[in-house]
Image (cartoon, grey):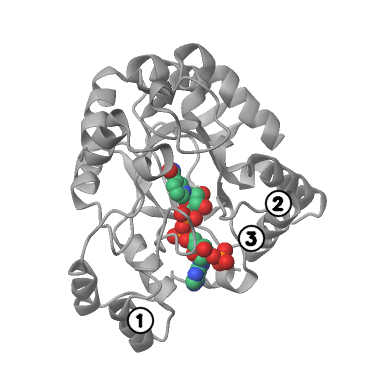
Amino acid sequence: MVCIPTVSLNGCEKAMPVIGMGTSSYPPADMETAKAAILEAIKAGYRHFDTAFAYGSEKPLGQAIAQALSQGLIQSRDQLFITTKLWPAFAEPTQIVSACKMSLQNLGLEYVDMYLIHFPVRLTEMIKRTPVAEEIVRELDVKGVWEGMEECKNLGLTKGIGVSNFSCKKLHHLLSIAKIPPALNQVEMNPAWHQKQLRDFCRAKGIHITAYSPLGANNTKWGDNRIVESDVLANIANLNQKTTAQVALRWAYEQGVSLIAKSFNNDRMIQNLQIFDWELSEDHLQKINQLPQRKGFTLASILGPHQIILELDAES
Ligand SMILES: NC(=O)c1ccc[n+]([C@@H]2O[C@H](COP(=O)([O-])OP(=O)(O)OC[C@H]3O[C@@H](n4cnc5c(N)ncnc54)[C@H](OP(=O)(O)O)[C@@H]3O)[C@@H](O)[C@H]2O)c1
């Protein structure tokens, strides 16, 4: 089985495996499909799983963990690193602890390893579909919500707390009020969206970066095929006898970040773990560093082109 390196995070007692399995699928997978894929991932050696209230994957992940324990694939729940996220409709200071407890109930766990604010925005209602009406979109009460996140950690509901989709500007504000600084910021990052400025900022502040959509989220509503169909990456892959996906994942790993890749296909999930016993040459790194840059995921594409949302998408 592949040995996956781990990274220590500020304010989190548990080290995090640098590669995790994403569980957001498009179109959304049914419970049995998701559970079966997660069990296969545990067999393949994944020990870090990324879910969110919004993905509908907390329950199948919890069921897969229970089955992995009963089958002896893992000896204890502590062997896994589980991340879940606060949905914007619960991003109200008084609702954070109960939202975290609801996620724990879905997962059938007593604690998660990382609890993240999913997006730096608040919705005043639960939604069934997107885009959402402009009148339910509000600015996030960063101070009040973060105090709720800190309470989750102090209550032992999570080992660590962090954020997702936060800009340098939002992090700057958060750091000025946080008693417990965010352990990590989970953001889109791949060879077509390097996030150089945000990475430099986070490194200076001791905030770890986790890259989501490291393969460009091809075949999803929020991504495209710029990575998997890149001629530059395909050429580098051929020269290294690797796949284009492995080159993209290795590039992210060599930038010092952790990454969350999603595959519910047995061969591809195994392939995605095989990035630790080789490296990219300086020349190949240079070529990747010169690829055209464009953000793939925008909040506006999901929630709608509302003023608050457009301003968030424009922040660096
Ligand atoms: N915090 C956030 O706001 C946020 C946003 C987006 C994603 N995420 C998290 O990050 C995870 C990963 O990101 P993502 O799902 O957006 O995108 P991704 O991991 O970049 O790409 C997933 C897509 O690539 C395919 N794929 C996987 N391995 C492949 C390979 N070796 N070769 C070719 N295609 C491959 C998958 O299909 P198959 O399954 O068929 O292999 C799927 O269509 C998510 O699942 C979620 O947990 C977080």
Q: Nearer the viewer, residue 65 or 228?
A: 228
Dot 1: few (<14), some (14–19), or many (≥20) neighbours within 10 Å? some
Label for residue 30?
A: 2
Q: Which residue is mark 1?
A: 234
Q: Are marks 2 and 1 in contact (CB under 8 Å)?
A: no
Q: Residue at x 32, y 32 (%)?
A: 306
Q: Which residue is mark 3?
A: 41
Q: Secondary structure at mark 1?
A: helix
Q: Are marks 3 and 2 in contact (CB under 8 Å)?
A: no
Dot 3: few (<14), some (14–19), or many (≥20) neighbours within 10 Å? many
Mark 3 and mark 2: Cα distance apart in space: 17 Å
Mark 3 and mark 2 lie on one chain; the one further toward the N terminus is 2
Quadrant of residue 71 in the image? bottom right
x, y percent for residue 66: 76, 44
Queried on whether the Cβ of the residue with tag 1 lies below 8 angstroms from ligand 1, the answer reads no
x, y percent for residue 250: 37, 68
